[in-house]
Amino acid sequence: MRRLAAIILGVALLAGLALAQQRPIYSIEDRRSGFTFLTPETQALQNDDFSNPGLLWVDRGEQLWQTAPRNGKSCTSCHGDAARSMRGVAARYPAFAAEVGRVINLEQRINLCRGRQELPPLPYETQDLLALTAFVSRQSHGIPIDVNINGPAAQSFANGRAAYEQRRGQLDLSCAQCHEANVGARLRGEVISQGQVNGFPLYRQIWQTTASSHRMFAWCNEAVRAEPFASGSQEYVDLELYAKWRGRGLSIEAPAVRR
């Protein structure tokens, strides 16, 4: 069923792009959150702290932050009040981590901290990792993205940019062909956004759950009939760094709501 859905989506994608304008509708320097492409109803859902379903994951993350596991050490034990200690963190990740010698994202930073607590890492897309990531990201709500792409992060950034521009899959399409060349065009009734990642982790209505940016990358890969990388892979971390840089200056919205 997943393969059939990917084929149907791929055919729709080709048909939509064939009808799209051949020039950018928005300059990439005119950076726009995916929020601006939503219907008023979905925008209202994201903005309502009582109705936004992603906030259920934030609440769960707060519980995990404060709960001491079997070793007696909670996140609070080291970091104290998250509203203060985590303010701005999500706006700076992915970032180079000297202790592992590579660029990592926020989920991987959380798992490194769990290692210091002598706890096993949380697998990608599990509810607890999504919850902790959503909670930490929420503390940066409204702060502009400002990732570092220089120094030891430069190669990761270059890899991410190359991946973004590379054609792939049986449909021979790149990320840039949708999210730069055809922004604002319609694809089967949907408006093509800039593909910004300032809202992750976000609640996606068609999935009825909160998800990471890596799940969205994999979904797009499947749409063009390309083999996706594993969530948490360095390929996707590098792509996440580049995608985050593309949205520099946009405010963190997590948890956003998308269709």
Image (tube, rainbow, N blue to C red):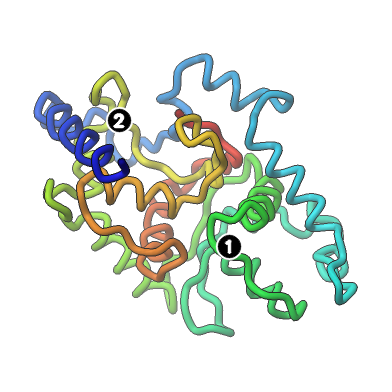
For label 1, the crowd category at 10 Å Cα-Cα, with few meaning under 14, some 14 to 19 and many 20 or more, is many
In this image, 72 relative to 113: left or right? right
**In this rendering, is residue 168 above or below 111?**
above
In this image, 240 relative to 120: left or right? left
In this image, 254 relative to 17: left or right? right
Q: Earlier in the sequence, mark 1 or mark 2?
A: 1
Tell me the residue at 46%/65% (across/down).
232
* Separation of marks 1 and 2 at Cα, in angstroms: 27 Å
Q: Return the mark for residue 230.
A: none
Q: Nearer the viewer, residue 30 or 132?
A: 132
User: For mark 1, what is the residue?
Assistant: 107
Tell me the residue at 86%/72% (across/down).
70
On the image, the x and y values in percent for residue 59 come to 76, 43
Q: Which dot, 1 or 2, sits closer to the camera?
A: 1
User: For mark 2, what is the residue?
Assistant: 192
On the image, the x and y values in percent for residue 117 come to 77, 77
